[in-house]
Image (tube, coloured by chain):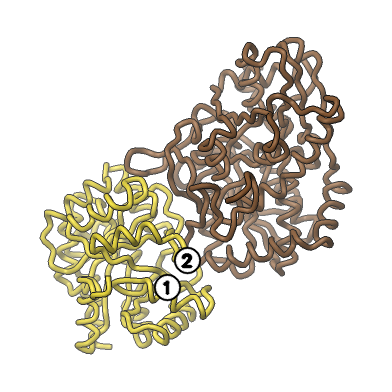
């Protein structure tokens, strides 16, 4: 797949217009109104949206997303129920799912990639599928036209980053800190560092996520990166019962801060 | 993989199983660990230091005991490899001393571990005390309740015990928490994984550190059996480290290899492949891939997955896997205590339970069972179960 996919195209359009990219994350199947939340997030100026498909053992996720996962699973959310709700949602903003590899593996790589494409999903993030293990999945995803977004960590030696950027589609997801997902009081120095190291080796959009929890932190890291992924802060808002409007407001705050620079 | 139970190569594969399915943050750490392990294992100085520790500190070699009274009751010859007699009371110390030495060699100052029954946690806390390292052990909240003696031992040894409060609050969740901590502290901390599972190189490295069980047992059996080998080698299987250790000594013989899983945690028994905790193996899961909670009377086997090399041995038919119920385990726990004066760990009582059930099939044979731990830790729980 050498041509640029829908997800990457949207992010590039934002970058080329001189703006910073905002990709919010919401947990699929969390609450009865999560599809309305998805619409609210899209309307608030997201360039792309990540939708978490809950997994029983999310080792890359902190307490907020774990809690959201557990609640969604307890209410009966399944990969199929989430994908069919998305299929019917008619969202224009490009979507990516984030889940763990066993969900794809159990369905079968080809079947899962096809299911995503049929639901109108452009991208996929599998945080426990590092570069060396991507083979059978990316083959299926490429064929189905699903962009596999790879993560790059602060621990990666210099020679590893170009390999990750080369294989990543949609954007390159720089992990902002050593740790799991969650809001922190301040931006880790490693966020600026990994953003700079990635920008040096790729022309693909570089977004920083994990530990980016406030509009100010998003602005700070976006001085180096092309933009941010914001997860736990938004899921916190969902968990607090703020409803689609409340979540949309928070995304608008991130959008406004990034636009103001 | 070319030879059975050999080096799984750079991609860490045992047939189609194994691999390295972990967050990107940990990939460089696993690559570094693989390199360090290869270098250490090829270094006679490291091997000598480990051998000395195993002999002078852990008390190896462990004996093989022939069980005449149990043998009479079961109708066949029974040999026990006595890993229960090691320092800290189980086979876990073999792996932990190896990994702690390796951690020191790599310049790490702090150990992280997960534990189920607490045997691996106690062994890790012991090695940390011995080598002057910091240690934090994650343990499911449910297991903390049923294994309070081991919790106290770990604290006494200077380790911090952190309850895993998510999910089923057992071993699976302790592994999740340990991995999350490792993602955050990978630069100074060493993850001392307790079973032959996890991302490459752990399944291979842990098996290698436990091969001493099989090597000793092979030689001891040759002496006892006039140069022969037992007909059957059996051991309990949760993640499968004690079983893989003893199997390794006999995989190139005609001996039948039998792993015994708890009925409520029979990952191999269900034969559904999956990916969790770093490797592809057999995994208890629902139809969409959510991992199921195991249920077993024994905290050490209360795990929905299994080490990838066991999945491979089952897949190619070199080993077979049986499962037993909690009730059979409780019977077997008492049987060995009564007939031989040896109180087994509940984990090992699983293998004994199968041996008892399969007595007709085993009639006239010689069976070597890996008694991987002693039952002192379980006595309190069994007082409740048996109502005495």
* Residue A187, quarter of the rendered image: bottom left
A135 or B210, which lies in front?
A135
Q: Chain of mark 2?
A: B
As drawn, B34 above or below A255: above
Q: Colour of chain B?
A: brown
Q: Secondary structure at mark 2?
A: helix
Q: Quadrant of residue B80?
A: top right
Question: x and y percent of residue B282 in the render?
Answer: 47, 40
Chain A shown in which color?
yellow
Q: Which mark is residue A164?
A: 1
Q: At x 76% / y 15%, what residue is drawn?
A: B71
Query: Gap in Å between the C-alphas at discs 2 and 1?
Result: 10 Å
Extreme residue toward the right, this view: B56
- In the rendered image, is residue B347 in sight? no
Q: In the rendered image, which residue does mark 2 sit on?
A: B24
> Looking at the rendering, in which quadrant would you find the C terminus of chain B?
top right
């Amino acid at each position: 797949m050498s041509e640029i996919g829908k997800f990457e195209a949207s992010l590039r359009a934002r970058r080329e217009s001189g703006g910073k990219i905002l990709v919010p994350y919401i947990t699929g199947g969390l609450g009865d109104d999560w599809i309305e939340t998805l619409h609210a997030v899209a309307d608030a100026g997201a360039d792309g949206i990540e939708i978490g498909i809950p997994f029983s053992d999310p080792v890359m996720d902190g307490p907020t997303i774990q809690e959201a996962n557990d609640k969604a699973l307890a209410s009966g959310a399944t990969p199929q129920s989430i994908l069919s709700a998305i299929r019917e949602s008619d969202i224009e903003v490009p979507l990516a799912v984030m889940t763990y590899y066993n969900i794809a593996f159990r369905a079968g790589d080809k079947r899962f990639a096809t299911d995503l494409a049929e639901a109108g999903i452009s991208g996929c993030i599998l945080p426990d599928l590092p570069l060396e293990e991507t083979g059978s999945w990316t083959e299926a995803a490429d064929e189905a036209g699903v962009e596999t977004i790879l993560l790059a960590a602060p621990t990666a030696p210099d020679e590893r980053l170009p390999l990750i950027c080369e294989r990543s589609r949609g954007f390159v997801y720089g992990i902002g800190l050593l740790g799991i997902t969650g809001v922190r009081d301040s931006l880790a120095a490693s966020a600026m560092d990994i953003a700079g190291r990635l920008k040096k080796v790729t022309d693909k959009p570089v977004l920083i996520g994990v530990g980016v929890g406030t509009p100010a932190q998003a602005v700070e890291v976006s001085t180096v990166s092309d933009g941010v992924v914001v997860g736990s802060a938004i899921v916190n808002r969902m968990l607090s019962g703020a409803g689609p409007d409340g979540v949309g407001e928070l995304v608008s705050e991130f959008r406004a801060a990034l636009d103001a620079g | 993989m070319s030879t059975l139970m050999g080096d799984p190569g750079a991609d860490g594969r045992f047939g189609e199983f194994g691999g390295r399915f972990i967050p990107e943050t940990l990939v460089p750490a696993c690559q570094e660990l693989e390199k360090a392990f290869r270098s250490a294992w090829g270094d006679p100085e490291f091997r000598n230091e480990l051998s000395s520790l195993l002999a002078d500190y852990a008390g190896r070699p462990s004996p093989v005991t022939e069980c005449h009274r149990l043998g009479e009751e079961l109708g066949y010859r029974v040999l026990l490899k006595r890993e229960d007699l090691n320092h800290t009371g189980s086979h876990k110390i073999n792996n932990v001393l190896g990994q702690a030495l390796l951690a020191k060699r790599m310049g790490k100052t702090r150990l992280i571990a997960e534990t189920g029954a607490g045997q691996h946690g106690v062994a890790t806390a012991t090695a940390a005390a011995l080598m002057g390292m910091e240690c934090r052990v994650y343990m499911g909240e449910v297991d903390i309740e049923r294994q309070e003696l081991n919790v106290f031992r770990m604290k006494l040894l200077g380790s911090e015990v952190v309850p895993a409060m998510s999910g089923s609050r057992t071993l699976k969740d302790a592994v999740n928490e340990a991995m999350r901590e490792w993602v955050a502290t990978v630069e100074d901390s060493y993850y001392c994984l307790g079973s032959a599972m996890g991302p490459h190189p752990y399944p291979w490295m842990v098996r290698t550190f436990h091969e001493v069980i099989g090597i000793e047992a092979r030689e001891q059996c040759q002496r006892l059996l006039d140069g022969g080998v037992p007909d059957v080698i059996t051991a309990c299987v949760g993640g499968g480290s004690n079983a893989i250790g003893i199997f390794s000594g006999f995989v190139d013989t005609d001996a039948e290899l039998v792993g015994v899983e708890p009925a409520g945690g029979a990952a191999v028994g269900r034969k559904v492949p999956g990916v969790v905790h770093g490797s592809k193996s057999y995994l208890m899961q629902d139809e969409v891939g959510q991992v199921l909670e195991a249920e077993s009377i024994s905290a050490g086997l209360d795990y929905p997955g299994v080490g990838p090399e066991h999945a491979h041995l089952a897949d190619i038919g070199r080993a077979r896997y049986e499962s037993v119920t909690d009730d059979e385990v409780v019977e077997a726990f008492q049987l060995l205590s009564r007939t031989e004066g040896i109180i087994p760990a509940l984990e090992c009582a699983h293998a004994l339970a199968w041996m008892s059930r399969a007595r007709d099939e085993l009639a006239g044979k010689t069976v070597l069972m890996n008694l991987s731990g002693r039952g002192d830790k379980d006595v309190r729980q069994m007082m409740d179960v048996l109502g005495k």
